[in-house]
Amino acid sequence: MSIRSEREKHSSDEESPSPSPPSLPILPPNTSDRLLTLRIDTHILPFVITLYLLAFLDRVNIANARAFGLESDLHMTGRYDYNTALTIFFIPYILFEVPSNILLKKLSPRVWLSACCIGFGVVTVCQGFCRNFGGLLAARFFLGKWLSPSELSYLQAKLALDQGPSAAEKRITPRDVLRVLTDYKVWLGGLMYLGLIVPAYSYAFFAPTIIQAYNSSSAIETQLRSVPPWACAFGLAMIVAIASDKARHRFAFTVTPILLSVAGFGVLFSVFDKLDVQYAALFLICMGTYAAMPVIVCWFNMNLGGHHRRAVGSAWQVAFGNIGGIISTYSFLKEDAPRFTKGYAICVGFISLSVVSCVAYELAVAWENRKKEKILREGELNLTEEEKTALGDLSPEFKYML
């Protein structure tokens, strides 16, 4: 979609001129952007990380419960009962992701995120009281002042510049959502994430089962063996994230870890009688997959300009990508143990999809950058600040990160 046509669409929607963008105030004395960012990080990140950790544990600890006799305790005698219990979580998770981001904007993060945290906490507690398969399905379904005034004013002005004039007051309309979803780059962002979600959830949901199939050990030993790959994945993810940030580059830091994961699946395809080698391959899979995922999410979100495009686009990536969660739940079946060839093949196929999508996205944003540079050189468009805000990353002055 051309920048000119987008400009005409947004211009036709405006009923009255918006105020000019706020100017950035003078940085308060005895501080710096770096120190302010560090202060924000130290106050916000620990809580966000903790909430995400708890939400992820609530989502995937069913795999550990299975190793401790979940299926026998809840009389899950059906062939695919466990897989169905995994799948049911993703239905509301996919359907409500975009509406959730719209409500987040409408109600404010402190209200909506707090309500979500309380909600998934209550559902998780209720999940522990399930006594049959139906109860488990129901529970899985529902599971889906420290700045000075001058510093606060400075940061609010920076956010206003990033969001654009009156962005916080503008509601997201169905037309805004449609505009975002008709951008081919948004679909590529969803495919990049979808391709990694399948192996990511496959490992999260079935790692204890796979490890137990390799070595018929006790439930406790199986749980302990599933921990080291997660720890190594955390370490590599931090290294990749820091390196990507320092280099101001994303593409190479997504594809390289993904290839590490492919190597792990290659080992599992070719080695069947060496438990230590097979266990080491799980490290490669977990490390590669979970190191690439944060960079893909960050890359896509940083290339979404404007408040509305970022809110809708980021929610779309997560919602569309988590369709892969449904696929993963039926990838590793009991009858395929201990080799799980079908499951590994499915994971490799979707990892390949992620690599192809990353390459296509890289080429797309590079091409868009060249097109914008040409427009700026030729001076074809003279956009107002309001029009630049409405266009978001489609503005010729917005440069995509590669």
Image (spheres, rainbow, N blue to C red):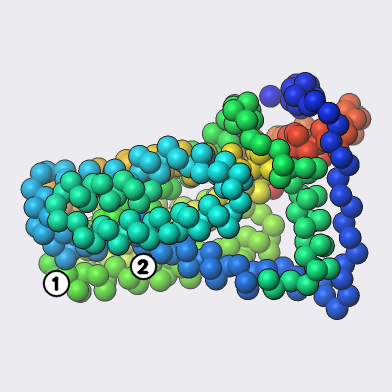
Question: Label 2 belongs to which residue?
Answer: 229
Report the front residue among 70 and 108.
Answer: 108
Disc 2, SS: helix
Q: Is residue 190 left or right of residue 135?
A: right
- Residue 218 marker: 1
**Looking at the image, residue 217 lies above or below residue 372:** below
**Looking at the image, residue 260 lies above or below residue 101:** below
Q: Amino acid at mark 2?
A: Pro
Classify residue 57 by image quadrant: bottom left
Task: Where is residue 303? Give x, y as percent.
Answer: 67, 44
Q: Is residue 238 left or right of residue 172?
A: left
Which label's residue is closer to the chain start, 1 or 2?
Answer: 1
Which of discs 1 and 2 lies nearer the camera? The answer is 1
Residue at point 66%, 36% (across, down): 171
Classify residue 176 by image quadrant: top right
Residue at point 28%, 51% (across, down): 139
Residue at point 61%, 45% (across, down): 105
Quadrant of the snapshot with the N terminus: top right
Q: Amino acid at mark 1?
A: Ser
- Residue 171 marker: none
Residue at point 51%, 44% (across, down): 100
- How far separated are the C-alphas under marks 1 and 2? 19 Å
Task: Where is residue 325? Give x, y as percent.
Answer: 36, 45
